[in-house]
Amino acid sequence: MKIERLINAPVSSNCYIISDGSGAIVIDAGTADSEELLNYIQSRDLKIDFILLTHEHFDHCAGVNAIHKQTNAPLYCSEKCNELIQHSRGNYSAYWTEGKPFEVAPADKIIEDGEQLNWRGHSIYFYLTLGHSLGSTTIRIDNEALFTGDNYVPNIRTYTNLSGGSKEDLRKTLAFYSLFIKYPSMIVYPGHLKPLTISHAHFFESLRGYSEQQMKKVAEQLKIKED
């Protein structure tokens, strides 16, 4: 399995292309025309099996319509994310000063908390993880990769002041992330900035005034939903 990071534009969020054999998954296509992404796919003779979103904000979903038009790849996301991407105010593109407001077509599949998807010999897990937004979802592939969206960005405090954000929910989400330290080879792929090993992902630092000891206390009450 190969994971490639593309930088969305004009907002420098992360888009990830996960490929294995001739198939690929796209996570958070945030560039409106998706030209670079589509060229990457075509040059490597890949087929996009599906598109995933970590959450509904415009800098993570602006390219979905273009990809769907060119490839007909289905979109998977949470129910709340699906609801919000269909409205320019819900996906915040209505407030985007560097681009035009847009709406994303409805998802082809709604994912549930703890749902597992088998893909080309890999297990993909979906976790509804509130904090940054109402539609936030964390995606895990095997015990190797954790895609956190904007719930966790290294060395940056997570924004919870947008509609649907919650510091209390974020505490639970960050504590939940800390449980994955049991997989020492796991790489964390955030919504912005560079990926890093889970041993270097100090999740508690994403919330002001939240200590590692407090995070561990909350984590004791949680568990990882898996097979």
Image (spheres, rainbow, N blue to C red):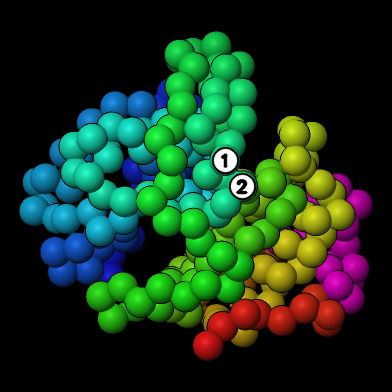
Q: Which label was assigned to residue 194? A: none
Q: Position of residue 194 (x, y in %)?
A: 49, 50
Q: Position of residue 143 (x, y in %)?
A: 47, 79
The vertical placement of 155 against 180, above or below, is above
Q: Quadrant of residue 175?
A: bottom right
**Residue 192 placement, left or right of 73:** right
Q: Which label was assigned to residue 80? A: 2
Q: Could one spot residue 13 in this view of the protein?
A: no
Of residues 201 and 84, the one nearer the viewer is: 84
Residue range corresponding to the magenta coloring:
203-218
Query: Which amino acid type corresponds to the residue marked 2 in the rendered image?
Result: Lys
Instruction: Please name the residue shown 35% across and 77% down the image.
Output: 118
The vertical placement of 146 against 12, above or below, is below
The vertical placement of 7 against 120, above or below, is above
Instruction: Please name the residue shown 31% across and 73% down the image.
Output: 119
Q: Could one spot residue 94 in this view of the protein?
A: yes
Q: Quadrant of residue 180?
A: bottom right
Q: Position of residue 132 (x, y in %)?
A: 70, 45
Query: Element at badge 1?
Result: helix
Give the labeled residue for mark 1.
Answer: 83
Of residues 132 and 152, the one nearer the viewer is: 132
Q: Is residue 206 magenta?
A: yes
Q: Are marks 2 and 1 in contact (CB under 8 Å)?
A: yes
**Residue 72 placement, left or right of 160:** left
Q: Residues within 10 Å of mark 1 (few under 14, many from 20)?
A: some
Query: Which amino acid type corresponds to the residue marked 1 in the rendered image?
Result: Glu
Instruction: Please name the residue shown 52% across and 44% down the image.
Output: 82
